[in-house]
Image (cartoon, rainbow, N blue to C red):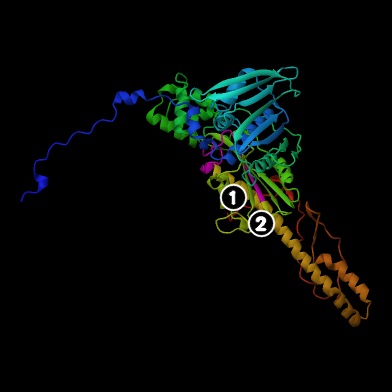
Amino acid sequence: MVSPDLLPQEPKEAPKRRATAEAMASRQREISVSEFFTKNRHLLGFDNPAKALLTTVKEAVDNALDACEEAGILPEIVVDIKEVGKDRFKVIIEDNGPGIVKAQMAKIFAKLLYGSKFHRLKQSRGQQGIGISAAVLYAQLTTGKPAIITSKIGKGRPAHKIGLRIDTKSNAPDVTSDEIVPWDKEHGTRIELELQAAYRGGRTGVDSYLEQTVVANPHLGLIFDPPKGEPTVYPRASEELPREAKEIKPHPHGVELGMLQMMLSDAPDETIKHVLTDRFSRVSAAVADEICVKAAVGPKMRAGDVHGDELDRLHKALGEVKVMAPSADCVVPIGEDLLKTGLRRRYPKAEFYASSTRPPSVYRGNPFVVEVGLAYGGDMPTDESADVMRFANRVPLQYQPKACAISESVYQTNWKAYEVSQPKGSLPVGPLAVVVHLASVWVPFTSEAKEAVAHYDDLMRELRLAVQECGRKLATYLRAQHKAQSEQKRLGIFQRYIPEVAEALSIILERDKDEIARQFQAALPNFVRLGQTTEGADVAAEEAPPAPSMLPPADSAAPPSMGEPPAGFDNDVSSSEIPAKKPGKSKN
């Protein structure tokens, strides 16, 4: 019997085409960046009402701080949040910055990917030209209300007040109102946004963000008026304005091949040597010649002619030739002293503070500096995980800690080696707060929301080293404390038995009991070394005067020496105050 599968089959009808190429082409159109983020606002940190409120405040405060510092003005910022309805809040941020010229106000606040910082290699909080305009867009989407911007650029100049929306199809500002208003400030900017939001406390709330902001910015004076309760005033802790970051060129170490290709294509008629010396930092004529020799390309070869293997060799040579470390002028770390000042602002009762700033380093051609500070003791809980604060260019990072290289550096540190308890794979446990700050001309965030730092090897190395430096300082302090406590117990034992021994010797030697006890007491410094602690601050050893010899008589065997006393110790430690450690293998 013939299988039905082998019998001739009726031809099947061809499937109908759902759309022609012409019809599909007619539906193609450019997507504006505003349209994209309208549908993907979670990428910018607006994925839930509580986070949306935090992101709005954060972006406005960051812009205010950047503007004040660039203008050389000690910042005074007011953050006012008012509840105006169910799940609706009005956010008002006002600063004393230089103000914004009228012609730029609409574009700065109502055009995404518009700003002055993207193309400059210098440290700043804002980078992409998205943040504050994204907040305006979110407010527009959730309440339909325009943003209200008021700005004044100087004494005697008019204050301009405008209403703004974003035309999402064209990514262009739509000015809904424009007027001149009286304003008693000499200069500054004020933004008002009404948005759908939720006000919450905790580690990811606005309160915590502002508390951390004053730690990293001790030169900031801040007033926070929450929806409920009394305003909180954070007085300025330092009159020292951070120095101005200087714009630099890319460093050759870490520059990716695609970036090098783009830099060469931007100057096709220039020689390779000229591009290397003119477009990179720290590349002298001699270094450029060495790079060309190692890459086997002529220094006078036109940049536009470099392709294929020659480009690969040139890129490889950039990483192999020794080049000076990048200048630190482009980044502005908080500084060891001011970092401790900020920690005292947040943890005034801690008993120990330490900080450390690493030398400048490079990732992908971008200079960066890592610094770490810690506070220990006081009224911090002893049975909870350490409080870890992450900062990038002085801005607190409150979300996605597990995805962040900064958190990873704290987890990977062996805190047990520094006298602090640490469960396996967890944060240290104890009365400890750790601040880790990454200052860079371009922070490699994992997303546009700027919540976590990417795990670049060069970054991870410097982060770990900085944490370990502070850990060693903490261990030095804790070991001195433990030794002092041990000596205190030892002293107690001596003092407990001196009266009994003195009484027994007085009988044997027929001498005055009190005189023998006084000689024992005078000899105690030979056997017990005690530091003198001042409350919540310094620990310093106090050398005792030479003591008379003890009984029994001098021809008897002397008791063994108890070793050197604890060294004088100041708990306010900076990297220059700890002697260099002898070479050897580290436990970490």
Q: Is residue 459 left or right of residue 339?
A: left
Residue at 58 percent of width and 22 percent of height = 107
Q: Is residue 262 visible?
A: yes
> Does the stretch in magenta take in 183?
no
- Quadrant of residue 523 within the rendered picture: bottom right
Circle on res. 512: none
Rendered location of residue 572, percent (x, y): 74, 48
Residue at 75 percent of width and 59 percent of height = 566
Q: Check disc 1 and report the residue beneath it.
A: 410
Q: Check disc 2 and report the residue beneath it.
A: 430
The answer to whether 463 is drawn above or below residue 587 in the figure is: above
Residue at 35 percent of width and 23 percent of height = 26
Looking at this view, name the residue that lies furthest to the left: 1
N-terminal of the two: label 2 or label 1?
1
Rendered location of residue 448, percent (x, y): 53, 35
> Does the stretch in magenta take in 445?
yes
The amino acid on which the numbered mark 1 sits, given as a three-letter code, is Val
Magenta-tinted stretch: 433-458
**Considering the numbered disc 1 on the image, is that residue within a helix, a strand or a loop?**
helix
